[in-house]
Image (cartoon, coloured by chain):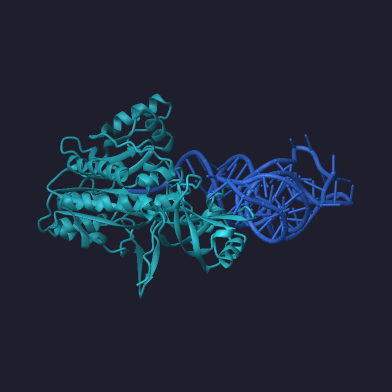
Amino acid sequence: MGKMRKWTSEIGEEDVGKEVLLFGWVHEVRDLGGLVFLILRDREGFIQITLPKKKVPPETFEIAKKIHRESVIKVIGVVKKEPKAPGGYEVIPKEIEVLNEAAVPLPLEVTEKVPAELDTRLDHRFMDLRKPKVHAIFRIRHQVMQSVRQFLSEEGFIEVHTPKIVSTATEGGTELFPISYFEKEAFLNQSPQLYKQILMGAGFERVFEIGPIFRAEEHNTTRHLNEAISIDIEMSFTDHEGVMNVLERLIRRVYEDVAENCEKFLEWLNVKLEIPEIPFERITYDEALEIAKRKGEEIPWGEDLSTPALKAIGEEIEGHYFIVDWPTESKPFYAMPYEDKPEICKSFDLMKGALELASGAQRIHKYDLLVERIKRCGLSPESFEFYLEAFRYGMPPHAGWGLGAERLLMSMLGLKNIREVVLFPRDRNRLVP
RNA sequence: GCCCGGGUGGUGUAGCCCGGCCUAUCAUGCGGGCCUGUCGAGCCCGCGACCCGGGUUCAAAUCCCGGCCCGGGCGCCA
């Protein structure tokens, strides 16, 4: 049995005077002549490898002098407590093995002494992802997903996977990516919406899905992607208020878990998390129009809120908030209109500032009303037969929402561009890497 | 898709308005040298760039046209 590998972050008092095995990348080299410092980086942090010429084997000293930044090395050495070392400990190597030499020059500076533009960073994303600040985003993303799964499971939701290759191009609204499916035409799914509703008809009662959604819109903004991850739930025997409650408790839980378990990564990112208070503020669509109007952004009743209007509203309201009671005509066909006021519906958007994080609604569960709404939206019920059938044989009342994972993360971390939170983002012009 | 602003060494920038003084600035990096406590190490020497195509002109990084790409704003986003 070989020696156990240690993370750089694990080096502490108990290791002083002991030999450790480390793996990682050469983050920096500081060569003072008779004394060389290597900063070794692994995914958990850094440790200084110190080579006083007279205290390390000559061949090891020569390797350290010749090494290039970002090369991958293995180090076996003795831990020394040293106040002058960053972090208070350093390793005096007995052996350094270069496992793979990095070519020069590097496409990016991992040390971030010189900034790089996002586009350049994405072109060389593997290198960009080595930066602790960038890596931290994905460690937090991991925690967010863990929390979502755990919370929803605790709440009785069953995790499901619905098809991403679908036949309907007739849902209206967003553009779909066409693909060829043997002799048939097919599309990449824009949302699990119809399938998760069918699962309500299948008696699952509470389901959630975390999966990709694809939208062929030619949008060119800092908050849109052509491939994104959607966190979706659907829940039977409840209404829009019921699922809004699940949503706000989920958001709070995610913030709590990240604050508790990602301290180091938040620190790398220099982010202070504030746990949002619940319940979130609720404003109606009409009130939203009022605020926008007061700030000089007038929107005709019935229309969706424009970006400048959302910015105006976002400036006014602190933290997370819901916009509720939307005009029925501004929302998809499956949103449930109020019985006593059918021009508005039981649908909601979850906002943070001007950013829409989630949207949802109580859904129509009555077959006749649904067919009527599909027709009213200019769509053909025939192409929805696979969906509508589930509504003829005992569909329970139900509600649900879809939450954009990337939007949640970018708003949580205060990032300006949604591409920052995606490993390999897909946008209008980017298909590689 | 529309409007505005951009594209200069590996990376980030100055220069462009007002063409020549640009064999193009600075930082970082890279190569070499000095240096035993660096931690954005320091000092010395060196290396490396004007997005593509066309045009105007004695002369284009700089002006004009087209293309591609990037940024910001907006639109689109059942």
Q: Position of residue A157 (x, y in %)?
A: 18, 53
Asked whether A409 or A227 is in front, the reply is A409
Nearest the eye: A302 or B71: B71
Chain B palette colour: blue
Please state which of residues A73 and A310 is positioned toward the viewer in this rendering. A73
Name, please, the residue furthest toward the left.
A394
Q: Residue at coordinates 34% horizontally, 50% vertically from top-left?
A: A405
Spot occupied by residue B25 in the image (x, y as percentages of width and height)? 74, 44
Question: Residue at coordinates 31% horizontally, 63% vertically from top-left?
Answer: A164
Q: Position of residue A101 (x, y in %)?
A: 56, 67
Residue A173, visible in the rendered structure: no
Q: Quadrant of the N terminus of chain A?
A: bottom left
- Chain represented in cyan: A
Q: Residue furthest bottom?
A: A183
Does A281 sit left or right of B14 as displayed?
Answer: left
In the image, farthest residue toward the top: A294
Which residue is found at the position 61% from the left and 61% from the top?
Answer: A65
Image point (62%, 60%), residue name: A105
Residue B35 on image: x %, y %: 67, 52
Q: How many marks?
A: 0
* Residue nearer the viewer, A181 or A337: A181
Residue A85 visible, this orientation: yes
